[in-house]
Amino acid sequence: MPYEWTRPGVSGDAPAELHLWPYRSLGPRGFAVFIGATVAMLAVPLLAVLGTAILWVLLAFMIAAVAGMWWALRRNWRDASVSEVLTLEPGRIAIRRRESDGTLRHWEANPYWTSVNLRATGGPVAQYLTLKGGGREVELGAFLTPEERVSLAEALRKRLGEIR
């Protein structure tokens, strides 16, 4: 799952910390292999036109295709750099969200008055998970699958119940 409790917070006043991140199915090594394989496959047709003027035309298109693929994968990697950290302790619950552009967002409330809301329908995504408290309602785990949001909601309700 793309979230884990890094600090379980089981002893008395120790805070619990939950880290959430989006899936990254293609790591840096996979990125390099994919670009290399793409270049190799696109280079095969160039063998037939070696020594002709057509080679330069096809080479320009090949470079444009690889550059476009590189840009798209790098953009996807940057967009997937979103992360959320939820800190839960007896007197405070807080969420820090780092957007893909580096912007930090912060939300804080009292866990006694915080509720976990899971809307099966009616939200921007299926199983829309929010936390409501401190006069605001914030989304949590927008990048998770619906099943993961359901299990996360159950885990959060259990943790909040233990603190109360």
Image: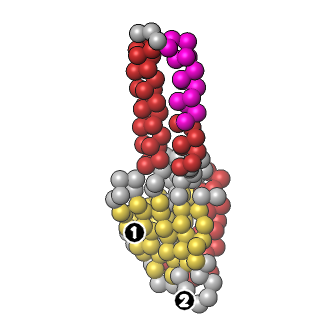
Image quadrant holding the N terminus, namely bottom right
Which residue carries the number 2 mark? 13
Q: Circle 1 — which element?
A: strand
Farthest residue in the bottom direction?
Answer: 12
Which residue carries the number 1 mark? 107
Q: Circle 2 — which element?
A: loop
Image quadrant holding the C terminus, namely bottom right
Instruction: Indicate which disc, 1 or 2, sits on the residue closer to the N terminus.
Output: 2
- The residue under the point 42% across, 32% down is 67
Instruction: Give neighbour class at mark 2: few <14, some 14-19, many 20+ (Cα, 10 Å).
Output: few
Instruction: Give neighbour class at mark 1: few <14, some 14-19, many 20+ (Cα, 10 Å).
Output: some
Location of residue 124 with respect to 49 vertically, above or below: below
- The residue under the point 40% across, 53% down is 100
Residue interval drawn in magenta: 36-50
Say what amino acid the circle numbered 2 marks: Asp
Say what amino acid the circle numbered 1 marks: Trp
Left or right: residue 24 versus residue 58 is right
Residue 111 % position (x, y) = 50, 77
Left or right: residue 114 versus residue 156 is left
C-alpha distance separating marks 1 and 2: 21 Å
- The residue under the point 40% across, 14% down is 57
